[in-house]
Structure formats: structure tokens, C-alpha cells
Image: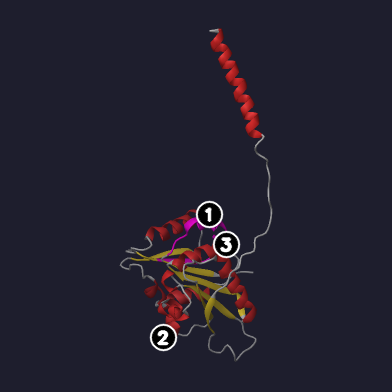
Amino acid sequence: MKWLLFQMVSLVLISGSRGADVDSLFQPKSIETEVTMKVGYRYLLTLPEGYAADTSKKWPLLVFLHGAGERGDDLNLLKKHGPPKMIAAGHKFEAIVVCPQVPTGQAWNAYGVKALVDSVKKEQRVDNARVYLTGISMGGFGTFDTIAQYPDVFAAAIPICGGAGAGVVKFGALKNMPIWIFHGGKDPTVPVAYSEMAYQWFKRTGAPNVKLTIHPDAQHDSWTQTYDNPDVWKWLFEQKRSS
């Protein structure tokens, strides 16, 4: 019995000694620094009719984020869908339209989109209260991510067949932003649940200006009928960010 007690006491002493030795192996440190990120996009720019006639007038800015299939270094790929396709077909937007392109293998970067908006504002006559963002598929995710990161930049947003991802935790600042979410009810690529979850999150927080439209028979391409609806554009361009 004495031998067992001796062993137990020895074990406790050894364990305590080892704990102290282990602690001496670690030195608490900290770092605080700034990291610079290089960002940039090639893009298509379309100016509205009458832009050159009145050099004092400021115009809305519409930014379109394409899907994964249009990545690369060929800007003509952007004309396959959305506003670039509409413009190529003769549609007239009463806005400056900017369509950036993501390089192959990359995804949308909120910081890059914001940098693009800032650059266009410096070069063109943009109404800062009427800057709009929309995107499809990968661009729908990029739309959510960008407005979550920069809620004070955009007057309204239309994310299509995308989702919120981890960005939903940052949506508190978007409570009052007008957002119209679209998705196809039979989407086999991005589940409609992604848009539904984002919408429900907004509803739980009492967001008054967020709505969801599901095209019940649409698959992944839910953007064509969305963008072909003049009521969608009427709604978008009516939105204005308060100062």
C-alpha cells in the first residue's frame, strides 16, 4: 500500500514537472500589420445615349458580374448573357454599364469589384446614390459577397441563381438595402435552397426591402427571363441610396 501511494505521489510530481517544462517551450507573441492585395479586371464599358451631350449630368452605374463559364481573357465571352447580351442586341440602358471579367481559375473578389467601382467613378460621371450590382451564378455569389463587404456603396442589388455562402454572417448592415433575389426552381447546378436560406435570414431580421422570386420551371438559367422583364429594371433604377 505504501509502495502504491509512493508511486502515485511520484507520478503527480513528475506530471507537474513535465507541465512546467512544456509551458517553457511556448512563447506568446502577436503581430499586427497591413497586407496589400493586388486586384484588377478587364471590363466592357457602355455609356448611355446622351452622355456626351450634357457634361454636367450624372448617371446611374450598373455593374454586372458574369458566371463561371465566362471567365478568361476574351471579353466577347461576356456578351453571352445578361446586360452585355442585351446591349449587343440593341437594348438601351439609361445608365453607365460596366461588365468586368474574372481571369481563368479565379472567382469574384469583393475588394476587386469595389476597386473597379471606385475607378469608374473617377473616370465617368457617376451618381453615387444610384450604383447597382447584379450577377448570375458565380456572379450571384459575388453580388452577395460584395454588398456584404461594402453595404454603403450600392443602392440595390439583384443576385441571380447564386447564394450567400459564409457572407450571410455579415448581412446585418444590409437590413435596409433593396435586394431582389431570383432563382430557378429546378436549378441542378446551384440549389434553390441557397437563395431561400438567404431570403429567410433577411426575413428573420425584419429586412423590409428584400424579396425573392423563384421561377418554378427554370433550371440554372433563371437570368434570361429575369433580365427580359422590364419591371425588374424599372424596380432597380427606382432605388436610390440615402446620403
Q: Is residue 154 visible?
A: no
Instruction: Give the SS element for disc 2.
Output: loop
164 is within the stretch colored magenta: yes
Name the foreground residue: 236 vs 220.
Answer: 220
- In-image side of 111 versus 180 (left or right): right
Which quadrant: the C terminus? bottom right
Residue 22: image x %, image y %? 63, 33
Name the foreground residue: 207 vs 43.
Answer: 43
Could you give the CA–CA distance between mark 1 and mark 3, rounded to whole angstroms? 11 Å
Residue segment shown in magenta: 162-182
Name the foreground residue: 4 vs 234.
Answer: 4
Amino acid type for the residue under numbered disc 3: Gln
- In-image side of 104 versus 19 (left or right): left
Earlier residue among tags 1 and 2: 2
Badge 1 vs badge 2, beta-carbon distance below 8 Å: no
Q: Residue at 49% across / 66% down in the picture?
A: 142
